Amino acid sequence: MKKKFVCIICPNGCEIEVKYSEEEIEKISGNLCEKGLDYVKKELFSPERGLTSSVNLKNGLLPLVSVKTSKPIPKEKIFALMDEIADIEIEAPVKIGDIIVKDILGTGVDIIVTKNVDKRIHS
Amino acid sequence: MIKKEVDIAIIGGGPTGLSAAISARKEGIDNILLIERNENLGGILNQCIHEGFGIEIFEETLTGPEYMQRFIDKVEQLKIPYMLNSMVLDINKKKEIIVCSPEDLIKVKAKAVVLAMGCRERTRGNICIPGTRPSGVYTAGCAQNFINLKNYMVGKRVVVLGSGDIGLIMARRFKLEGAEVLAVVEILPYSSGLPRNVVQCLEDYDIPLYLKHTVVNVVGRKRVEGVIIAKVDERWRPVKGTEKKIKCDTLLLSVGLIPENELSKMAGISLDPITNGSRVTENLETNIKGIFACGNVLHVHDLVDYVTLEAELAGKSAAAFVKGELRNESNIKVTAGNGIRYVLPHLISGKNDVKFSLRVMCPDRNRKIVVKDGEKILTKIPKMRVNPSEMIQFNLKKEYLEDVKELRVELE
Ligand SMILES: Cc1cc2nc3c(=O)[nH]c(=O)nc-3n(C[C@H](O)[C@H](O)[C@H](O)COP(=O)(O)OP(=O)(O)OC[C@H]3O[C@@H](n4cnc5c(N)ncnc54)[C@H](O)[C@@H]3O)c2cc1C
Ligand code: SF4
């Protein structure tokens, strides 16, 4: 099989062409450095992405608070993870770095808060 | 009306305003006032919950809110005074500012001013899309605000016009929130967003990108029912017979940003018709002495890290102005030549090291940025890849600039 990539590791943005089989890269061209090879390998055989989203917030100055995965997760788990956090509701106040779910879906990755949101004061 | 006197007034509390304030304080200016119209500091970063901020400055990738909090914490720690829910309505050449605040109207007399108002999005009106006027047409940033800050989902079947970074990021956001994203439509032959975003926002989710296409009509009476897209020729005219209808309930516009320079015009500041921002010297001073501009109100940035660095310089310059230490000898013109859309600063002195920022006209590979004085070549900077979506910066040492008459920057 053949595929083209734009390496996104550094601003050079090399256009890389690869020939590959189920398990390995047979031929690669266009990458200026080894990092390009690592990038393509990862993209082909075990792509990972950081995920950012938001969860519901009770009694906060905002109805939502933004969150992220503590590390990138396997790409194919993204939608399962979105489902998993859809029903979560936490209480204000929250702070950057608060962990809301530990080891989500057994990935070894936590869901952490990325914004400080204070409690709403009822008037 | 309340009256106030300050050394430095900073208009806008986004990343630009925050960094300018911190840097001015570090230069020993105590009497600073940071003025923000929203209910919190941080500007547009409040709603940019995705990652990709801070790689240059912190060498890690942060989300927008995490990035801004580091600067807000610093402002709090340095006890820099700021006003929220306070909008600047007027400013004049004498640096008298009228602020509408929850308390009262306030007249602020400042010795120096830093303009940090950011930009706003182009709307449907700005680009004249024909068709009916149903609900369901949003700018991408407006939809981002609704989804990420207010918890309103704005649509289920979405078409995005424009492939700039905001459009790409929002295409992914809609997909993650369970909406269908039927197309991203781009008039240019290439995406105007960062390659990273094309891969991670569109290709990852199989969202089709229609290059050399545009939206020629919006259909629907109350709510958007669909859009008609068509191919365009080299001069961006729709090609007859290529029309295609896409059924959707939402059209997102990501068709560019315009620096918010209404206030600058009131103060008599001269603007560059290409950047839509002020003309500035190497100190980021405008043509009005003591008024400085930086960040997105000066020119649209793709990376917030560059915004922060630029704002540090503006804060430092404003502080030097207040202390009477700012020398203004910038009278060497800098112009954009072949292949370059714009280059900043507009004027330099030739006596200091200068950092230049520029954008190229179109994407290309293996080019050189050439800096010339008349026919004399001062330096050549090789670039593996150039792209209009990525601002290019380079430094020139003052040794290169001695006796220069006029500086011209070209792409070779
Ligand atoms: C959707 C989106 C995605 C982005 N993604 C990335 C990314 O992944 N990585 C990255 O590095 N950069 C990204 N950027 C770019 C970065 O966010 C901006 O360059 C940066 O926020 C600009 O900062 P600023 O302070 O100049 O403007 P803003 O953040 O817009 O702040 C301007 C502030 O001024 C205030 N203001 C304006 N007029 C007045 C007035 N008259 N009185 C009082 N206050 C006023 C506004 O309310 C606002 O708070 C993105 C930008 C957007 C819009
Ligand atoms: S292959 Fe190497 S040089 Fe090319 S873009 Fe990737 S990291 Fe940069």
Image (spheres, coloured by chain):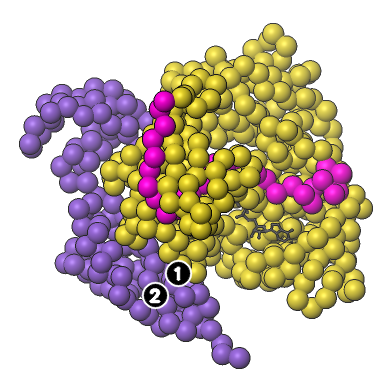
Chain colours: A purple, B yellow
In the rendered image, the vertical position of residue B171 relative to residue A59, given as above or below = above
Q: Residue at x 44, y 72 (%)?
A: A64
Magenta residues span B241-269
Residue B204: quarter of image = top left
Q: Is residue B403 magenta?
A: no
Location of residue B246 (image quadrant): top left
Residue at which label 2 appears:
A56
On screen, B242 above or below B18?
Answer: above
Q: Residues within 10 Å of mark 2 (few under 14, many from 20)?
A: many
Residue A47's spot in the image, x, y percent? 22, 46
Helix, strand or loop under label 1: loop
Pick whichever, B99 or B252, lies toward us: B252
* Label disc, if present, on residue B200 of the rendered structure: none
Q: Identify the residue at the far bottom of this view.
A: A123
User: Which residue is denoted by mark 1 in the rendering?
Assistant: B151
Q: Secondary structure at mark 2?
A: strand
- Of all chains, the one bearing label 2 is A
